[in-house]
Amino acid sequence: MFGPGVEKGVTVNEPTHFFVDCTEAGPGDIAISLTDDKGTDVPVDAEDNGEGLFRFVLSFKDFRFCAVLGFLSASLDYIT
């Protein structure tokens, strides 16, 4: 997970994005769930470049969030 949406300088209520590189993950689907610190879903749009790189576009209403990414049967938790 990398990009301006997970780095310092994110502005609340402004569109941002981050990338997830799945080029070495093998075949399968990706799923993402974003919630804020109160457990409320954060809407996110996913864009697949067709080569294993996914771009997720969203606007944060708060700086605290939890992202759960699912690859087949594994998951990665990222908390900032």
Image (tube, helix red, strand yellow):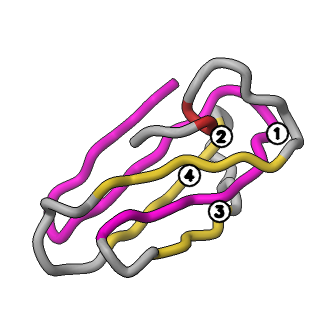
Q: Earlier in the sequence, mark 3 or mark 2?
A: 2
1 within the magenta span: no
Q: Which residues are magenta?
A: 52-80
Q: Mark 4 and 2 residues: CB-CB less than 8 Å, in contact?
A: yes
The residue identified by callout 2 is: 36
Amino acid type at circle 3 is Val
Measure the alpha-carbon separation of dots 4 and 1: 12 Å
53 within the magenta span: yes
Measure the alpha-carbon separation of dots 4 and 2: 7 Å
- Foreground tag (2 vs 1): 1
Q: Mark 1 and 3 residues: CB-CB less than 8 Å, in contact?
A: no
Question: Dot 1: what SS?
Answer: loop
Q: Name which quarter of the figure residue 10 lies in.
A: top right
36 and 14: which is toward the camera: 14
Q: Mark 3 and 2 residues: CB-CB less than 8 Å, in contact?
A: no
- Foreground tag (3 vs 4): 3
Amino acid type at circle 1 is Lys
The residue identified by callout 1 is: 61
Residue 39: x %, y % from top left: 62, 44
Residue 19: x %, y % from top left: 47, 51
Residue 56: x %, y % from top left: 57, 59
Q: Name which quarter of the figure residue 7 lies in.
A: top right
63 and 11: which is toward the camera: 11
- Foreground tag (3 vs 2): 3
The residue identified by callout 4 is: 34
Q: Is residue 57 above or below residue 12?
A: below
The residue identified by callout 3 is: 44
* Local crowd size for mark 4, using a 10 Å CA cut-off: few (<14), some (14–19), many (≥20): some
